[in-house]
Amino acid sequence: MQIGSYLVRTVAAMTAAALALAACGGGGGSSDNGNVRPTPTPTPTPTPTPIPTPVPAGSAAEGLWFGNTNNGRVAIGLVQGNGNYWVMYTVANNPSVIGGAIQGQLSASNGTLASSNAKDYSVEGNAVLSATVSGNYTSKSGLSAVIAYPSLNQSVTMSTSYNSAYDAQPSLAAVAGTYTGTGAIVSGGGESIRVTVGTDGKVSGLGLSSGCAFSGTASPLAKGNAYNLTVTFGGGNCLLGTSTLQGLGYFDSATKRLYGGAQLPDRSMALIFVGSR
């Protein structure tokens, strides 16, 4: 039944009834009292158009990047889809010893990238340096960057290639085990550290010289072969008391080596760790 024709017939029937009533002298009032008007159909509220979720600015350079710097260091970079990144680097001409890590947030599009808030946690220098990063990339192929240190009036160049290990699914079963290596609180000093990761993602660690114990969790990223890390120190001999740090970890299945970096919320200090099982 069509709503329009129904309303016309209804109004016509009501008008005829009103005229008949008036002819009989009934109603005792104005003929308007018998004119019943149909209730207008309410206008439906339009459904709002969903706002598209913005694509993270750093997603174009996302991935795991292996390479070298121009001053003889091995560099391993991890860039997340949201632009968050960590770059671990070794001591010059000694790829088995960690030299520090760089963390920040980058934007990347059309083959260029930039980061204005980089922090270089230098294990060698026992210092935290502010830096900027600029460079070029080809998605899932190559990434090169210049890391500039305004306070030192110096810069370092880095050239890396995409590592397809990033495309694998992270697994707690794969990373579980006990690792011994070098850890450092930057700035605060370093020592040998033993770290254990359980199949349930629980992390425990101990500074072998200081006796500082810490615990935490490792959880696989939703995308990318890496892990979110949370570390809480146990007080006592720990330089950072009972502080909690957050960062990222990467397990190299070929070398059985675990890389980890976690920082305080204000980014004033960080824990850097590299160990093997």
Image (cartoon, rainbow, N blue to C red):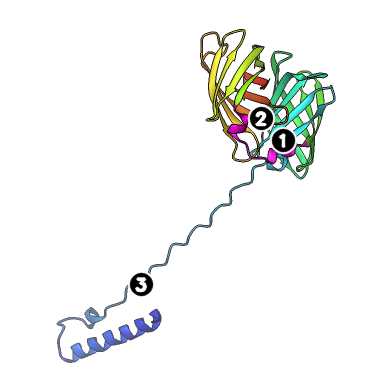
- Residue 130 coordinates in the image, percent (x, y): 70, 22
- The disc placed on residue 64 is 1
Question: Element type at marker 3?
Answer: loop
Is disc 3 in contact with disc 2, using a CB cutoff of under 8 Å?
no
Question: Element type at marker 2?
Answer: strand
- Residue 165 coordinates in the image, percent (x, y): 71, 37
**Front residue of 69 and 9:** 69
**Front residue of 255 and 93:** 255
Is disc 3 in contact with disc 1, using a CB cutoff of under 8 Å?
no
Question: Element type at marker 1?
Answer: strand
| Residue type, label 2 | Tyr
Residue at position x 85%, y 25% from top? 70
| 3 or 1: mark nearer the eye | 1
Quadrant (top left, top right, bottom left, bottom right) of the C terminus: top right
| Residue density around tag 2, few if under 14, some if 14–19, many if 20 or more, within 10 Å | many
**Front residue of 65 and 254:** 254
Q: Earlier in the sequence, mark 1 or mark 2?
A: 1
Q: Earlier in the sequence, mark 3 or mark 2?
A: 3
| Residue type, label 3 | Pro
- Magenta segment boundaries in residue numbering: 162-176
| 3 or 2: mark nearer the eye | 2
| Residue density around tag 1, few if under 14, some if 14–19, many if 20 or more, within 10 Å | many
Q: Which residue is mark 3?
A: 40
- The disc placed on residue 250 is 2
Residue at position x 57%, y 18% from top? 205
